[in-house]
């Protein structure tokens, strides 16, 4: 009888479950592990950049991406689904900025993403998104924020968390290493070490993607897409994606 409900998104099973959402979470748990850690002076989100073939151009792969100047995201699960959600989030961020003349608060952006994902759990002819997101950002209302958004549209705030196939082991590792006084550089080291626990073989700067919330606009690349350049005023907290040589420096420090 259970099979009768597993193919319908909009029909609850007798046990009160929407089985397709559970299948979507299974897709997330088969995805590459992603890490998020909130520090006292920033946030780091990181993941492994795994190429399906040695012939693939690694520079075309992107799992850590900016939504707007103050918000970035990393995903685990199905890449095309994440790409659609990121595109929708960027449009919402621009719409908010046109009206209020400032980048959106992190909580507002998370609610918008979660609303899209929830809509796909109660509409006929669609399926849930097979992806979970870690959303990192800063705003003047709540300071640093790190959220996880799941295929059901549920979202949580975290100090540190992991999603993807090595989620359980990664969370156990984070519980042992995390503390409330962790600074950004230490958080980046912890994120890399956490990923390293679940990666077989050599870990180098081309096998990782790392994004940070920082006041140093000379680090990495932001929404403007140009290294060592920022369109924002100095002293503001902004999302920056680290470049390979910057990731290499962190790897050398933990070797």
Image (cartoon, rainbow, N blue to C red):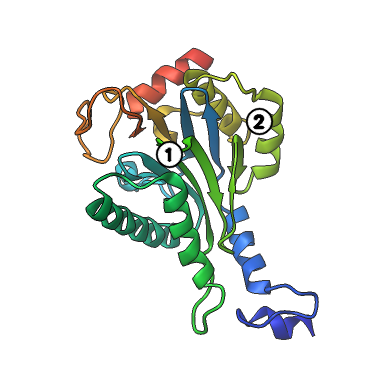
Q: Earlier in the sequence, mark 2 or mark 1?
A: 1
246 is higher (above) or lower (below) than 132: above
Where is mark 2, residue-wise? 174
Where is mark 1, residue-wise? 137
What's the CA distance linking mark 2 and mark 1?
20 Å
Specify few, some or many for label 2: CA neighbours under 10 Å numbering under 14, 14-19, or 20 or more: many
120 is higher (above) or lower (below) than 25: below
The quarter of the rendered structure image containing the N terminus is bottom right
Quarter assignment of residue 214? top left
Instruction: Between residue 108 and residue 85, name the one nearer to us.
Output: 108
Specify few, some or many for label 1: CA neighbours under 10 Å numbering under 14, 14-19, or 20 or more: many
Query: What element does badge 2 sit on?
Result: helix
Residue 82: tell me if it is visible: yes
Look at 58% across and 26% down and name the residue there. 193
Count of numbered badges drawn on the protein: 2
Q: Is residue 43 left or right of residue 166?
A: left
Whole-percent x, y for residue 2 in the image: 77, 80
Look at 50% across and 60% down and name the residue there. 114
Instruction: Between residue 148 and residue 106, name the one nearer to us.
Output: 106
Q: Is residue 75 left or right of residue 8?
A: left
Label 2–label 1 contact, CB within 8 A: no
Which is more foreground, mark 2 or mark 1?
1
Look at 44% across and 35% down and name the residue there. 207
Whole-percent x, y for residue 184 in the image: 48, 22
Whole-percent x, y for residue 180 in the image: 62, 23
Query: What element does badge 1 sit on?
Result: strand
Whole-percent x, y for residue 216 in the image: 32, 22
Q: Is residue 173 left or right of residue 185?
A: right
Residue 255: tell me if it is visible: no
- Which mark is on residue 71? none
């Amino acid at each position: 009888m259970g099979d009768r409900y597993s193919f319908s998104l909009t029909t609850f099973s007798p046990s009160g479950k929407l089985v397709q959402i559970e299948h979507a979470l299974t897709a997330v748990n088969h995805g590459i592990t992603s890490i998020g850690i909130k520090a006292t002076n920033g946030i780091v989100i990181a993941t492994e950049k795994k190429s399906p073939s040695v012939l693939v151009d690694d520079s075309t792969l992107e799992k850590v991406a900016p939504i707007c100047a103050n918000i970035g995201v990393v995903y685990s699960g199905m890449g095309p689904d994440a790409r659609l959600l990121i595109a929708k989030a960027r449009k919402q961020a621009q719409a908010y900025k046109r009206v209020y003349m400032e980048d959106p608060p992190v909580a507002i952006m998370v609610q918008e993403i979660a609303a899209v994902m929830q809509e796909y759990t109660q509409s006929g002819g669609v399926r849930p998104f097979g992806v979970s997101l870690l959303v990192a950002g800063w705003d003047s209302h709540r300071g640093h924020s790190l959220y996880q958004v799941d295929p059901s549209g549920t979202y949580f705030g975290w100090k540190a968390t992991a999603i993807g196939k090595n989620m359980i082991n990664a969370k156990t590792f984070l519980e042992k290493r995390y503390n409330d006084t962790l600074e950004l550089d230490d958080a980046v080291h912890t994120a890399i070490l956490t990923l390293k626990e679940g990666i077989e073989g050599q870990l180098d700067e081309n096998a990782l993607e790392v994004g940070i919330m920082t006041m140093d606009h000379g680090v990495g690349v932001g929404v403007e897409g140009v290294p060592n350049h920022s369109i924002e005023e100095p002293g503001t907290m902004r999302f920056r994606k680290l470049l390979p040589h910057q990731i290499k420096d962190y790897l050398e420090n933990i070797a």
